[in-house]
Image: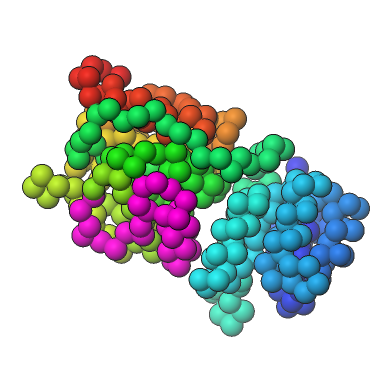
């Protein structure tokens, strides 16, 4: 099946680069390259693309304004092209809230090897975006409340892994968690800098405290710790405490940070006191880790297909046969609290 792609960017150089990548890829069809939002609007109506790459910064009408209008008029999978800066991260996170599927850094044009890596990344992201299931319903801004946590403990740890679509999924789960929830560790596939902005944004929205992990923190209730974009997050036991260790090893399951690395460390250190959740994302990262969690007696959960932007990671986890519950996104936080309360009654889930 041909994937029709529209490139929207005010830079002639970037339009040319992206256009050449798309034209040279089998099963991709470049339907147009627009220099501004007005031209892009006409091309969207004429060609009805399957995927759009959209520059954040454009003249006349900026990328966010165009995106917001597009998602209301004709929802289409969009990949935002943004700078790897603090401001770029903030704008990109806002774009994901508005309905963008994914994002990609502006390419470095001075290194041949970098261009090849960029080509591989943009091809992968376009293929992934074409599979995304966009919701036609407007996103709710109301924070969902979870049941009261009747079982207070420092022994339980919740571990969450996600990729494409994960920023909004993680926000949905964390904003509904009670202030006295167990410590939470999170791996979301994001570049450095973006995780810093993402943690700050979540912290402003949640009742719990959300931080980008720095390494050697004691994991405490009411706090969530996000893996930085260039380190693996692991959990170790230190006496009666759990602590975070960041490592700079190679990519695992194609990623750094890797969900599998985090889950495996949680399985070994936390064992039956662990609750692991795999959220939306492309690929298999987390599937091996969820098996480790289950083998060590931990509770395992995956987001269902209906509410996943990309069902790849949850599906691969479910295929292992080690996922105990498959749950819709809006219900995950409630289910976690129910499981914790049941654990407090000392009966098997």
Would residue 289 be visible to someone looking at this image? no
Of 81 and 128, nearer the camera is 81
Query: At 44% from the left edge and 60% from the top edge, which residue is drawn?
Result: 200
Of 238 and 120, nearer the camera is 238
Query: At 20% from the left edge and 53% from the top edge, which residue is drawn?
Result: 218
Of 267 and 186, nearer the camera is 186
Residue 166 sits inside the magenta stretch: no
**On screen, residue 251 above or below 291:** below
Q: Is residue 171 left or right of residue 33?
A: left
Of 19 and 70, nearer the camera is 70
Q: Is residue 70 left or right of residue 264?
A: right
Color scheme of the displayed model: rainbow
**On screen, residue 239 above or below 196:** above
Locate residue 299: give its quadrant: top left
Q: Quadrant of the C terminus?
A: top left
Rendering coords of residue 274 (x, y %): 27, 35
Would residue 97 be visible to someone looking at this image? yes
Q: Residue furthest bottom?
A: 110
**On screen, residue 285 above or below 105:** above
Query: At 50% from the left edge and 35% from the top edge, which residue is drawn?
Result: 144
Q: Residue furthest top?
A: 347
Q: Which residues are magenta?
A: 190-219
Numbered marks: total: 0
Q: Is residue 1 left or right of residue 96?
A: right
Rendering coords of residue 120 (x, y %): 59, 61
Locate residue 25: give its quadrant: bottom right
Residue 202 sits inside the magenta stretch: yes
Rendering coords of residue 92 (x, y %): 59, 61
Rendering coords of residue 317 (x, y %): 43, 34
**On screen, residue 145 above or below 109:** above
Query: At 56% from the left edge and 58% from the top edge, which residue is drawn?
Result: 93
Q: Quadrant of the N terminus?
A: top right
């Amino acid at each position: 099946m041909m994937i029709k792609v529209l490139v929207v960017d005010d830079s002639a150089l970037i339009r040319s680069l992206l256009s050449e990548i798309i034209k040279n890829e089998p099963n991709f069809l470049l339907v147009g390259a627009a220099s501004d939002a007005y031209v892009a609007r006409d091309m969207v109506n004429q060609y009805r693309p399957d995927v759009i790459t959209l520059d954040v910064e454009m003249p006349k009408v900026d990328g966010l304004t165009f995106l917001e209008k597009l998602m209301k008029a004709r929802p289409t999978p969009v990949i935002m092209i943004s700078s790897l800066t603090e401001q770029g991260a903030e704008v990109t996170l806002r774009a994901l809230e508005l309905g963008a599927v994914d994002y990609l850094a502006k390419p470095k044009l001075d290194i041949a090897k970098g261009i090849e890596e960029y080509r591989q990344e943009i091809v992968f992201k376009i293929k992934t975006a074409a599979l995304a299931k966009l919701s036609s319903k407007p996103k709710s801004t109301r924070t969902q409340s979870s049941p009261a946590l009747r079982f207070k403990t420092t022994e339980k740890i919740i571990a969450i892994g996600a990729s494409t679509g994960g920023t909004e999924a993680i926000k949905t789960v964390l904003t509904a968690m009670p202030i006295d929830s167990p410590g939470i560790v999170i791996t979301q596939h994001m570049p450095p800098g973006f995780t810093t902005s993402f943690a700050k944004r979540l912290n402003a929205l949640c009742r719990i405290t959300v931080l980008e992990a720095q390494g050697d923190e004691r994991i405490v209730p009411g706090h969530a710790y996000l893996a930085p974009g260039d380190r693996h997050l692991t959990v170790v036991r230190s006496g009666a405490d759990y602590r975070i260790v960041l490592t700079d090893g190679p990519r695992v399951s194609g990623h750094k940070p890797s969900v599998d690395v985090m889950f495996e460390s949680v399985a070994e250190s936390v064992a039956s006191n662990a609750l692991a959740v795999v959220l939306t994302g492309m690929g298999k990262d987390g599937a091996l880790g969820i098996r480790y969690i289950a083998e060590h007696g931990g509770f395992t959960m995956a987001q269902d297909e209906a509410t996943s932007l990309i069902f790849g990671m949850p599906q691969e986890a479910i295929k292992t046969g080690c996922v105990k519950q498959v749950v819709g996104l809006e219900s995950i936080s409630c289910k976690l609290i129910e499981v914790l309360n049941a654990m407090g009654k000392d009966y098997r889930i």
